[in-house]
Image: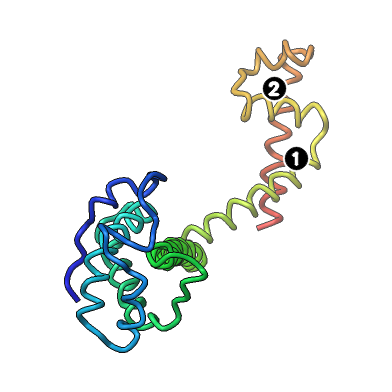
Amino acid sequence: MTAVREHPLAADPADRTAPQTHTCRGRDLTGLLPRIARGDERAFGTLYEEVAGPVLGLARHVLRDRAQAEEVAQEVLLEVWRTAARYRPERGEVLTWVLTITHRRAVDRVRSAQAAADRDRRVAAASHTPPFDEVAEAVERRIDRDRVRRCLGALTELQRQALALAYYGGYSQSQIAAILGAPLGTVKTRMRDGLIRMRDGLALHE
């Protein structure tokens, strides 16, 4: 089939002032369909010259892609050739019928492309498996956190507070003493005792 050429009527597919009649440039399109249904290639060539431009214009309007629009236009014109016998004048004008087919096929192409993209994203997401080392490290960190949490639970309140302020808050022993309102010597002793208990507790859970 000859490559589709854009018709002046296709310059603005949304232009509602474009003629939508049984004729294009004075030619009667209605009479062409029965001849095309009988396999008349000359009749199809005449119809092709009249509707190819509007078909391509509408396809480009929907798809926003020249190459895909040309593919759709070829598909539409081939469908017109094959299904010309189905056209019924009482249901609408020839150009309207052809453009309805065009719009349907263009929208189907958009939906198909979107569905394929969504499917690829789902497959990519489902097939992503973290490397073994990442999983192992995550599990190890979780175990370590659980062990530390259990050991902290065995400390006195002062020991827990002092160690938390030191290792999570970054405070010095003097600052911790001021925050807790406890003598510096007491804080040092509690922190030392707490660390010993933590070390022993972690050793038991290894």
Q: Is residue 28 left or right of residue 200?
A: left
- Height in image: 55 above or below 61? below
- In percent of width and height, residue 118 lies at 48, 62
Q: Badge 1: how crowded within 10 Å, few (<14), some, or many (20+)?
A: many
Q: Badge 2: how crowded within 10 Å, few (<14), some, or many (20+)?
A: some
Q: Between residue 94 and residue 78, name the one nearer to us.
A: 94
Between marks 2 and 1 in the image, the one whose residue lies nearer the viewer? 1
- Residue drawn 69% across the image and 45% down it: 148
Q: CA distance from mark 2 to mark 1?
A: 17 Å
Q: State which quarter of the image contains the C terminus.
A: bottom right
Write down the quadrant of residue 93 in the picture. bottom left
- In percent of width and height, residue 168 lies at 63, 29
- Height in image: 15 above or below 136? above
The circle drawn on residue 107 is: none
- Residue drawn 31% across the image and 77% down it: 78
Q: Is residue 197 left or right of residue 58?
A: right
Q: Earlier in the sequence, mark 2 or mark 1?
A: 1
Q: Between residue 132 and residue 97, name the one nearer to us.
A: 97
Q: Which residue is mark 1?
A: 152
Q: Residue furthest bottom?
A: 38
Q: Which residue is mark 2?
A: 188
- Height in image: 153 above or below 187? below
- In percent of width and height, residue 172 lies at 61, 18
Amino acid type, callout 1? Leu
Identify the secondary structure beneath mark 1: helix
Residue 3 makes an appearance in the image: yes
Write down the quadrant of residue 51 in the picture. bottom left
- Residue drawn 39% across the image and 58% down it: 21
